[in-house]
Amino acid sequence: MGLNQTPAANRVHIGFFGRRNAGKSSVVNAVTGQSLAIVSPVKGTTTDPVYKTMELLPIGPVMIIDTPGIDDEGTLGDQRVKKTRQVLNKTDVAVLVVDGTTGMNGADEELIHLFKEKGIPYIIVLNKSDLCTVCSYGADEPYIWVSAKEKSGIYGLKEKIARLAVTEAPERRIVADLIQPGDFVVLVVPIDSAAPKGRLILPQQQTIRDILEADAVSIVVKDSELKQTLEGLGKKPEIVITDSQAFRKVSADTPPHILLTSFSILFARYKGNLESTVRGVRALDELKDGDRILISEGCTHHRQCDDIGTVKIPRWIEAYTGKRFQYEWSSGTEFPEDLNGYGLIIHCGGCMLNEREMKYRQKCAEEQGVPMTNYGILIAHTQGILKRSLEPFPDILKLLESEL
């Protein structure tokens, strides 16, 4: 992601769904004004979801998603349909494209059922109006006639999508509501073999931006420089925010009268699941030898030799519990639908996932009775500093203190 781009997780996700050859890709291209998707009369041309970040007026920053046909067939077709269903978990606005010359069928009705089940606002697009002598549609559903070929009705479609999109500023902030103009905020960013070359990771970028918008001062240091920096500041910082992997050292170097938390914990609050993830971490103390733990990440990246998800977290867990567990991993869009058999789910901060998908994953865990926590809370708990890391959030601490 470029420094001047809106993060994908903060964009309105607009998914285009429908049967093969309904004209989804043609409608996507007409809406975006680009040849984003390959168009062909051959059924099943779109074989994987196609993602494109862009500015779409009058909405603003969006993520456009073109999906394979929901009626695809065969072994590969089943896999493509599965990918399409996964897209629903992150879709803020759904566009169902129907071939207006043939009308809707059971596959279209199934999609509408899924939209309603998942609470996704949607619009039905009856495509190929140029081939219809009389364009009429009697169903009691929100719809619009368009012709992707002649570009008719496309402006009206964009207006309807915009009305369905949630574009107002989110009520939650990353850290700005915890600080005042002029406050010092110290960000601890370890630079090691796992740190990306030449840039900060997304949560760090977004936190710095949020601090600037609050008219406060961000001071970025490595964990090895924190103690010296705090001693030489001449002014008490309002809060220290650290990468969770450095929690133990940063806690030791930060005086107890200075608030301390992590990027991962801030993002759990930002995504709206801090309370549930703090409750979830208690399950770690109740697990038995051999229990299964799912460690899930919202992005895919090259695994380092001392990777946090596959190496460090299992090591910290077993040092804390003195037990051995079975670990399984998922990353990117892959998140198991069947969570039965897991004793605990440990998720990353989810900076690459939008709020809808994070809530979907949390809901899956809750409905199947599987506790779920996140990296920062798990690390703080195993290192005995969870209570301290929650002090910036007195309401959460007061509500949960008796349970920790």
Image (spheres, helix red, strand yellow):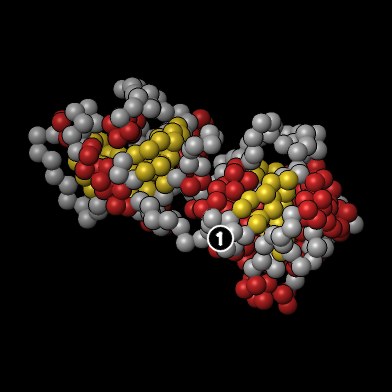
In the picture of the structure, the residue carrying the numbered disc 1 is 181
Between 341 and 49, the one lying in front of the other is 49
Residue 359 x/y as whole percent = 53, 56
Q: Considering the numbered disc 1 on the image, is that residue within a helix, a strand or a loop?
A: loop
Q: Is residue 289 visible?
A: no
Q: Is residue 285 left or right of residue 218?
A: right
Q: Residue furthest front?
A: 234
Residue at point 31%, 41% (across, down)? 57
Residue 159 x/y as whole percent = 25, 46
Q: Is residue 74 left or right of residue 130?
A: right
Q: Is residue 310 left or right of residue 42?
A: right
Q: Is residue 280 left or right of residue 361?
A: right
Q: Residues within 10 Å of mark 1 (few under 14, many from 20)?
A: few
* Image quarter of residue 119: bottom left
Q: How many marks?
A: 1
Q: Quadrant of the C terminus?
A: bottom right
Residue at point 57%, 44% (across, down)? 352
Quick check: 391 above or below 208? below
Residue 320 x/y as whole percent = 86, 58
Residue 85 x/y as whole percent = 47, 44
Between 40 and 216, the one lying in front of the other is 216
Q: Residue furthest left?
A: 133
Residue at point 41%, 42% (across, down)? 61
Q: Quadrant of the N terminus?
A: top right
Q: Is residue 30 visible?
A: yes
Residue at point 17%, 47% (across, down)? 137
Identify the amino acid type marked 1: Pro
* Image quarter of residue 25: top left
